[in-house]
Structures are given as C-alpha cells and as structure tokens.
Amino acid sequence: MFDELPKEIQALARKRYKLFQENPTHHSFRLHELKDMKRGHHESGSISVSVNMQYRAIYVVNGNINLWYWIGTHAQYNHFTGKN
C-alpha cells in the first residue's frame, strides 16, 4: 500500500512515523480507537492516526510495539473501516 502512495505522501508518512516513534500521543495525530462495526476489515483494538487531512494510517498495539498496518486516503479509510 505504501509503495502505491504518491511520493510526496510517502515522504510525509515517513516524517509522521518518525514523529510517532518519538511521541505517539502527539496531538497532531488526532488518534482515536476504531469501533468494531462488523463491516470493516480492521483488527480489533486498532487506532487511527492522521498523516494529513487527506490520508490516514491505522495501527494496532502488539505487546509493546505499535504496528502500522494500513495507510490510504480518507475515502479508502472509510471503506476499509466499514464507515460507508
């Protein structure tokens, strides 16, 4: 998925991930836990993080590791999480 992103979004995502590693609760991420709506494809307990206003990433906590496993546009996010 990452490889299919525009190059400028890849660069931004890398920058945002580095900030996330330094401060995973930074207010600019607009973090929120995803609800299990039985329609989405996300893992239970997943958390949404804002890359920018058009792109979001999803991660899950696995032990003491925050595993980012999905990234895409907000429209793709809505589809993946079952919001539409």
Image: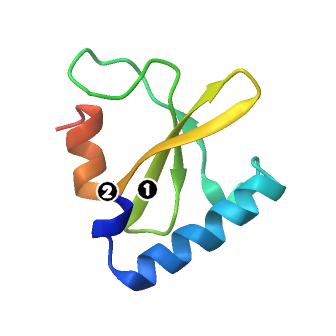
Compared across the picture, whether 28 is left or right of 58 comes to: right
Q: Position of residue 7 (x, y in %)?
A: 39, 83
Q: Quadrant of residue 41?
A: top left
Q: Position of residue 10 (x, y in %)?
A: 46, 74
- The residue tagged 2 is 1
Pick the quarter of the image with the N terminus.
bottom left
What whole-number distance in Å separates the C-alpha atoms at marks 1 and 2?
12 Å
Is 50 drawn above or below residue 47 in the view shown? below
Disc 2 packing (10 Å; few <14; some 14–19; many ≥20): few
Q: Position of residue 16 (x, y in %)?
A: 63, 66
Pick the quarter of the image with the C terminus.
top left
Residue 56 is labelled as 1
Is 54 drawn above or below residue 57 in the view shown? below
Residue at left offset 52%, top offset 79%: 11
**Residue placed furthest toward the bottom:** 8
Compared across the picture, whether 71 is left or right of 16 comes to: left
Residue at left offset 33%, top offset 79%: 6
Is 46 drawn above or below residue 79 in the view shown? above
- Return the disc, 1 or 2, that comes first in the chain's sequence: 2
Disc 1 packing (10 Å; few <14; some 14–19; many ≥20): many
* Residue placed most toward the observer, 30 or 69: 69
Compared across the picture, whether 50 is left or right of 77 comes to: right
Badge 1 amino acid:
Arg
